[in-house]
Amino acid sequence: MARHKVDISGVNTANIKVLKKEEMDLLFRKMNNGDPFARNDLIEGNLKLVLSILRRFKSRGENLDDLFQVGCVGLVKAIDNFDLCHEVKFSTYAVPMILGEIRRYLRDNNSLRVSRSIKDLAYKAIRLKEESYAEKGIEISNDEIAKKLDVTPYEVTHALDALKEPISMFEPIYNDGGDTIYLCDQIEDQKSSSKDFEIKLALDEALKTLDDREQYILDERFIVGKTQMEVADELMISQAQVSRLEKNAILRLKKLLK
């Protein structure tokens, strides 16, 4: 079967080689022993990792060639800093670094002006999140970041929110083949009753009982509107695992909200 050819930054994506774990380990050992070609082979063999992350930014209207090159900078940093002694897969270590590089590029090119002090706090928080994910496979909470940086949780949340990319009110957030749901359709009705408010509070409390991965899956599936396969690709797990985690999370929420 012919593979679909896409050129990004002059790279034919159909011809990108994907390295097996054994090949990766061998190349890392060669690179650490001074082999001048091993590093380049590692970069070329992991370009599809960068491409898989670019899918998240397709709808933003950004220049994919630029994002690909920025993502490759993150990949190179991950390769240069990866240690085979880490008890994690290289992809698990590299994804947060590639994502972080792309997000920094987008934030620095944001048309909205954010004060230097808020940016600095946000970057410190992001760095702590990336380090936590790389070392433990989990993202540190804003409360923990606030303690480490000696600021309030509100300041951390505010700083991170200030760097988020603004989106249009008419941004499509869900489409199952029928009518598209836009962001403006989901804006809260200020005339909601107190009962609606109580339900929202109960749901918020119930959601806190889920772990970060379960919350992420529910957000991506039912708020953003992604398929289980898309979420599986992002988390680098199987679609069956996403389905199981989603089902268990919903069952727990139902029990708590009865």
Image (tube, helix red, strand yellow):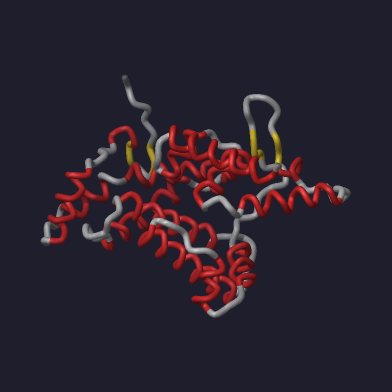
Compared with 101, 16 (above or below) is above
Name the one closer to the observer, 164 or 244: 244
Provide residue 50's location: percent of width, then percent of height: 38, 47
Name the one closer to the observer, 218 or 84: 218
Q: Quadrant of the N terminus?
A: top left
Provide residue 40's location: percent of width, then percent of height: 21, 52
Q: Quadrant of the C terminus?
A: top right
Residue 70 visible in the current orientation: no
Look at 16% across and 52% down and name the residue there: 38
Look at 40% across and 65% down and name the residue there: 131
- Residue found at the far bottom of this picture: 150
Residue 208 visible in the current orientation: yes
Name the one closer to the observer, 203 or 224: 203
Name the one closer to the observer, 27 or 211: 211
Quadrant assignment, res 22: top left
Residue 141 located left or right of residue 172: left
Provide residue 101's location: percent of width, then percent of height: 43, 59
Provide residue 134's location: percent of width, then percent of height: 37, 59
Look at 46% across and 45% down and name the residue there: 64
Compared with 122, 62 (above or below) is above
